[in-house]
């Protein structure tokens, strides 16, 4: 699968807007890009981590506690630190800030999985990400680290915490069909968001949610 943008985006959901914005913008030092209303009482506050978009989705309705997704930890190269610092955000999401250095991925996503070999095949073959080291994949400049552990089967898409990853691709219909043909599961069928994007969701073997996005501002056309 060819990436239209050399990075993986990450999305979380929260009910605590102001504390979360303050933490991520001030403590971590991510840069605000834009605010997007995405419907059903959800407003997406988009920030940059290198070429990745960090999507802080504020949900109007109260989110009830639910099992965590496989995305359990982020490592972010931050201008705010000179030495590694592990600190949770106001919702308790696990995060390590590391100094920005040449060659260091701006964002590293740590994904806990139930079957390491099965997930290596999914991310390497169905999604086509290159494996740089054992169980470590590169989505452009973003590192995805798979870790064997207590994975939650079929985590809900909407819930507190880190919930989904996004890959920007050139042809969502082709990419979606390829993932399903390669053993992936469908989360939601491809659909068009006006003149903004075509998107779909697929799911890895544990059911973690992965958005496939053909965004017009990146690829130039939705045709």
Image (cartoon, rainbow, N blue to C red):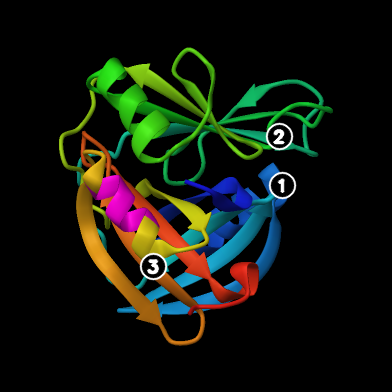
**Segment tinted magenta in the rendering:** 175-180
Q: Tell me if residue 76 comes above or below residue 18 in the rendering.
A: above
Per the image, is 198 magenta? no
Q: Which residue is mark 3?
A: 199
Left or right placement of residue 102 versus residue 1 in this view: right
Question: Mark 1 and mark 2: span between their CA atoms?
Answer: 9 Å
Task: Give the mark nearer the N terminus: 3 vs 1.
Answer: 1
Identify the residue at the far left of this view.
153
Q: Tell me if residue 133 comes above or below residue 120 in the rendering.
A: above
Q: Where is residue 135, by image quadrant?
A: top left
The reply to whether the C-beta atoms of the residues labelled 3 and 1 are less than 8 Å apart is: no
Give the residue displayed 42% in from the left and 52% down from the top: 12
Identify the residue at the far top of this view.
134
The reply to whether the C-beta atoms of the residues labelled 1 and 2 are less than 8 Å apart is: yes
Task: Give the mark nearer the N terminus: 1 vs 2.
Answer: 1
Q: Where is residue 193, by image quadrant?
A: bottom left
In the image shown, does 31 or 91 lie closer to the viewer?
31
Mark 3 lies on a secondary structure that is strand
Give the residue displayed 63% in from the left and 75% down from the top: 220
Where is residue 21 drawn, in percent x and y?
59, 59
Q: Which residue is mark 1?
A: 50
In the image shown, does 145 or 138 lie closer to the viewer?
138
Question: Tag 3: Cα neighbours inside 10 Å, few (<14), some, or many (≥20)?
Answer: many
Helix, strand or loop for the magenta stretch, by majority: helix
Give the residue displayed 32% in from the left and 49% down from the top: 178
Question: Mark 3 and mark 1: span between their CA atoms?
Answer: 22 Å
Q: Which residue is mark 2?
A: 77
Left or right placement of residue 124 versus residue 25 in this view: left
Left or right placement of residue 141 versus residue 169 in this view: right
- Whether residue 138 can be seen here: yes
């Amino acid at each position: 699968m060819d990436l239209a943008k050399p990075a993986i985006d990450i999305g979380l959901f929260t009910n605590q807007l102001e504390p979360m914005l303050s933490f991520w913008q001030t403590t971590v030092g991510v840069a605000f890009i834009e605010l997007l209303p995405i419907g059903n009482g959800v407003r997406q506050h988009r920030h940059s981590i290198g070429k990745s978009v960090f999507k802080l989705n504020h949900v109007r309705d109260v989110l009830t506690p639910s099992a965590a997704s496989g995305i359990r930890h982020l490592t972010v190269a931050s201008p705010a630190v000179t030495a590694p610092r592990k600190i949770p955000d106001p919702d308790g999401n696990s995060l390590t800030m590391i100094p920005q250095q040449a060659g260091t991925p701006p964002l590293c996503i740590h994904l806990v999985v139930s079957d390491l070999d099965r997930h290596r095949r999914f991310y390497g073959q169905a999604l086509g990400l290159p494996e740089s080291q054992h169980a470590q994949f590169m989505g452009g400049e973003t590192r995805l680290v798979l870790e064997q552990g207590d994975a939650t089967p079929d985590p809900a898409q909407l819930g507190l915490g880190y919930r989904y990853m996004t890959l920007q691709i050139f042809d969502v219909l082709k990419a979606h069909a390829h993932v399903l043909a390669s053993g992936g599961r469908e989360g939601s069928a491809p659909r068009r968001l006006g003149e903004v994007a075509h998107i779909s969701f697929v799911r890895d073997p544990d059911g973690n949610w992965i958005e496939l996005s053909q965004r017009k501002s990146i690829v130039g056309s939705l045709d």
